[in-house]
């Protein structure tokens, strides 16, 4: 909104200095700074309100015993993250751009699903919160909307997207796109649902999920800028997606919001983001990969989230298999998700988080290298 107002003023009145608002780099930096300031200002106020209303984390049964000390820590801090992402995006983003509209829709809708889950758990004291299948329904709905718009109405987003709407670029190969055809919508549903749940599973140690999200958001911002820049896209022989660069504003806001929230969520955490934040952030990351046509890079870029998810799938699958075969369930990991396995190996929580950050940065470098190593 602020961007559109300033652009109108610059076009009509030509005030000196207002021309910089047209630059994506300026608006992205402004969005990141605005998000950081909002998180710093809003954080203590929301944490205080959550404490006053006794909205705290319940003791987790499926976690190491040292996590019992975290019971009562304010949760639903995802409200801080969502506000710090959405407000700068609305201020500095081009709201006439359908890429921006879609990513805002994903973030708000999945944030609402996560909020409902947290509300039922910590306010209504329902141990399981929102029933799992209802969460899946919300995630599938979001995937259907995003996939449906791209599949059936690509001209709404960008006329040049029409021949590419059901395609995705293949890492490490030049001028190679994989067209999945009628499987495109199911693919989008799977990506958004899986990534949303992946970030949710990763959110088990202080600062782990939100710090990793910041790294991924920065990477996606770079990719979006390249995809939306005709010169860079031609130089790197990737599809040029007109208007895609506007997603950089959202990615910058996400990175700024994540860093701002990390200030309060770092060990020992003053607040947890809960499903309010994790479902929304995971869904947004999945949707961003879809919108910039880098779906096949998600296993690399979101490698931390993938590893956490696979550890849970492997653990449960192997336990059920061995129980059926031997009458006694056996485990691959000491505990799943993966970060709990390292805790039970004796690693201190801050060391686990730092090493996961290092792994995420290495995966970020590898993901960006795919643009040149082809």
Image: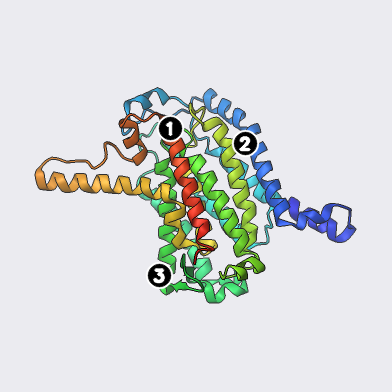
Give the quarter of the image for residue 33. Answer: top right
Q: Crowding at label 3, few (<14), some or many (≥20) Cα neighbours within 10 Å?
A: few
Helix, strand or loop under label 3: helix
Instruction: Tell me which label, 2 or 1, sits earlier in the chain.
Output: 2
Give the quarter of the image for residue 22. Answer: bottom right
Which residue, given by chain and number where applicable, does mark 1 sit on?
Answer: 351
369 lies above or below 134: below
Disc 2/disc 3 C-alpha distance (Å): 39 Å
Query: Residue 284: x percent and y percent?
Result: 52, 52
Q: Tell me which residue sits at (34%, 41%) in the image.
A: 338
Disc 2/disc 1 C-alpha distance (Å): 25 Å
Q: In the displayed orientation, state which residue is furthest to the left.
A: 326
Instruction: Tell me which label, 1 or 3, sits earlier in the chain.
Output: 3
Q: Crowding at label 2, few (<14), some or many (≥20) Cα neighbours within 10 Å?
A: many
Q: In the displayed orientation, state which residue is furthest to the bottom.
A: 163
Disc 1/disc 3 C-alpha distance (Å): 41 Å
Which residue, given by chain and number where applicable, does mark 3 sit on?
Answer: 183
The numbered disc on residue 39 is 2
Query: Residue 195: x percent and y percent?
Result: 43, 52
Q: Mark 1–mark 3 contact, CB under 8 Å? A: no
Q: Is residue 315 something one can see in this rendering?
A: yes
Q: Crowding at label 1, few (<14), some or many (≥20) Cα neighbours within 10 Å?
A: few
Q: Is residue 119 something one can see in this rendering?
A: no
281 lies above or below 69: below
Q: In the displayed orientation, state which residue is furthest to the front.
A: 373
Instruction: Tell me which label, 2 or 3, sits earlier in the chain.
Output: 2
Q: Is residue 181 left or right of residue 237?
A: left
Q: Tell me which residue sits at (60%, 61%) in the image.
A: 99
């Amino acid at each position: 909104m602020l961007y559109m107002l300033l652009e109108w003023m610059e076009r009509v009145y030509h005030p000196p200095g207002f021309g910089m608002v047209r630059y994506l780099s300026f608006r992205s930096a402004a969005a990141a700074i605005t998000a950081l300031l909002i998180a710093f200002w809003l954080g203590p106020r929301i944490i205080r309100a959550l404490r006053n209303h006794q909205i705290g984390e319940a003791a987790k049964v499926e976690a190491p015993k040292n996590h019992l000390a975290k019971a009562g820590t304010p949760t639903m801090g995802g409200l801080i993250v969502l506000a710090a992402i959405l407000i700068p995006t609305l201020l500095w983003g081009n709201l006439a751009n359908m890429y921006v509209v879609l990513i805002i829709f994903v973030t708000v809708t999945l944030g609402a699903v996560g909020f409902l889950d947290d509300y039922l758990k910590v306010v209504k004291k329902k141990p399981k919160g929102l029933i799992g299948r209802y969460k899946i329904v919300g995630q599938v709905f979001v995937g259907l909307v995003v996939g449906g718009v791209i599949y059936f109405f690509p001209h709404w987003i960008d006329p040049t997207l029409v021949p590419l709407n059901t395609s995705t670029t293949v890492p490490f190969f030049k001028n190679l796109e994989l067209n999945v055809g009628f499987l495109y919508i199911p693919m989008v549903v799977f990506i958004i649902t899986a990534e949303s749940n992946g970030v949710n599973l990763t959110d088990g140690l202080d600062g782990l999920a939100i710090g990793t999200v910041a790294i991924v958001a920065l990477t996606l911002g770079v990719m979006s800028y390249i995809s939306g820049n005709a010169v860079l896209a031609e130089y790197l022989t990737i599809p040029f997606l007109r208007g895609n660069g506007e997603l950089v504003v959202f990615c910058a806001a996400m990175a700024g919001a994540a860093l701002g929230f990390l200030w309060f969520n770092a060990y020992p955490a003053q607040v947890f983001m809960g499903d309010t934040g994790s479902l929304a952030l995971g869904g947004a990351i999945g949707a961003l990969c879809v919108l910039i046509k880098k779906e096949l890079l998600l296993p690399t870029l979101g490698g931390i989230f993938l590893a956490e998810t696979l550890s849970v799938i492997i653990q449960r699958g192997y336990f059920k298999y061995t129980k059926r075969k031997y009458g006694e369930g056996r485990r691959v990991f000491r505990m799943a998700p993966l970060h709990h396995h390292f805790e039970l190996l004796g690693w201190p929580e801050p060391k686990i988080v730092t090493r996961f950050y290092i792994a995420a940065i290495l995966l970020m470098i590898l993901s960006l290298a795919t643009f040149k190593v082809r």
